[in-house]
Amino acid sequence: MKKDLRSMSLEEIKELMIELNEPAFRAKQLFEWVHKKGIESIEDISNFSKELKEKIAQNAKITCLNLKTKQVSEDGTIKYLFALEDNNYIECVLMRYRGTKSKKRNTLCVSSQVGCAMGCGFCATGLGGFKRNLTAGEILSQIYTVNNYLKIENDDLMVGNIVYMGMGEPLLNFENVLKSIRLLNELLGQNISIRRITISTCGIVPKIVDLADLNLDIVLAVSLHAPTDQLRSQIMPVNQQYPLKVLKEACIYYVKKTRRRLTFEYALVNNFNDTKEHAYVLADYLKDIFSHINLIPVNPTVTEKFQRPQRVKIQDFLEVLTSSGIEASIREERGTDIAAACGQLRGKVVE
Ligand code: SAH
Ligand code: SF4
């Protein structure tokens, strides 16, 4: 089978060029075409001879995403639905932050799996079950493809921040996710600083420990969503395997190893996890962890079971946390009108 160039590291491309009896500098050039310029076809390489391109194409290919639909939100957020080569569907979301110059940025929320096996009760991706892991090339393709659209639109900003918060559980596709991050960081590639990359996990404890041991500058976000095991297990099955106590130990270990502040996500669900009492228990849980917690009014997905609390309740919840010395904020969600916000991605073709 032909190798996908978008999944290949510089080392692997060098090996390929050695096999093809080409000099080493060609490997660097090919890497740049693939990972920096984001070409969609080997034919687009303008400084290689036709013969060389044919030789490469006999051994390798570039896997592209096929755009199925695109929806634009009132706030400028864009949700893309892509078909993969095997006709599975994934979604990714471009958030365009404007305003003051220093805050201006394009953030892409990427998928790491087709579907998700974790089955969180409030999440549209989880409802569809798990299909398969994405390759590193398929993860990167989301970024390269969106950059190509931005170029066509003459946007002066490319994607500069990546959040692994689309479909799937990134820590259960550990190798490919890490490979994609290392490739994003390559000087000859996108050259994106690892500090601009966030991985969000539902709390796969051994993988949090593994990630900590790698000691990279990745921002880790942990989806908490409830302050007690009794409540958390009701909406997040993963909590039965990795309950709050062991999760906390892993979080403290991550901070100790990386010296980076953790982010927690807490989806507020009306009459479920949103009382002041819950906030006090939560504050007690968080007080030993160097972190920031984002409160997100839950997105009603396909079931009516999960509704947002009223604004005053959310404010009261925040007030308890901040007065207990916890760093917290309410996160304004983007793209809710086009179902592009957290937990709303389904990866299904819109009928
Ligand atoms: N699997 C990873 C990353 C993808 S989900 C994780 O669970 O962290 C991205 C974020 O969306 C997570 O914080 C997840 O808990 C949150 N989320 C899922 N469904 C949601 C919903 N209906 N409302 C608000 N946030 C939701
Ligand atoms: Fe999977 Fe994250 Fe959705 Fe849970 S919230 S089902 S872990 S994608």
Image (tube, helix red, strand yellow):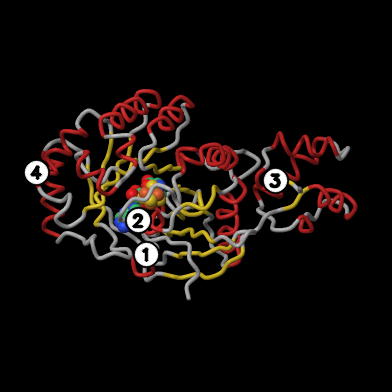
Q: Amino acid at mark 3?
A: Glu
Quarter of the view holding residue 243: top left
Mark 1 sits on what residue?
A: 335
Q: From the viewer's side, name the closer residue of 349 and 47.
A: 349
Q: Earlier in the sequence, mark 1 or mark 3?
A: 3
Mark 2 sits on what residue?
A: 123
Dot 2 alpha-carbon crowd within 10 angstroms: few under 14, some 14 to 19, many 20 or more: many
Q: Residue furthest bottom?
A: 351
Mark 4 sits on what residue?
A: 277
Residue behind label 3 places its C-beta within 8 angstroms of ligand 1:
no
**Where residue 10 sits: x, y (%)?**
69, 37
Q: Earlier in the sequence, mark 2 or mark 3?
A: 3
Q: Amino acid at mark 2?
A: Cys
**Where residue 266 sits: x, y (%)?**
26, 47
Q: Earlier in the sequence, mark 2 or mark 4?
A: 2
- Horizontally, is 119 left or right of 156 in the view? left
Whole-angstrom CA distance, mark 1 to mark 4, is: 31 Å
Mark 3 sits on what residue?
A: 32
Whole-angstrom CA distance, mark 2 to mark 4, is: 25 Å
Question: Quick one: SS at disc 1?
Answer: loop
Q: Nearer the viewer, mark 2 or mark 4?
A: 2
- Image point (48%, 66%), residue name: 348
Whole-angstrom CA distance, mark 1 to mark 2, is: 16 Å
Q: Amino acid at mark 4?
A: Glu
Q: Amino acid at mark 1?
A: Gly
- Image point (74%, 39%), residue name: 13
Question: Quick one: SS at disc 2?
Answer: loop
Question: Quick one: SS at disc 3?
Answer: helix
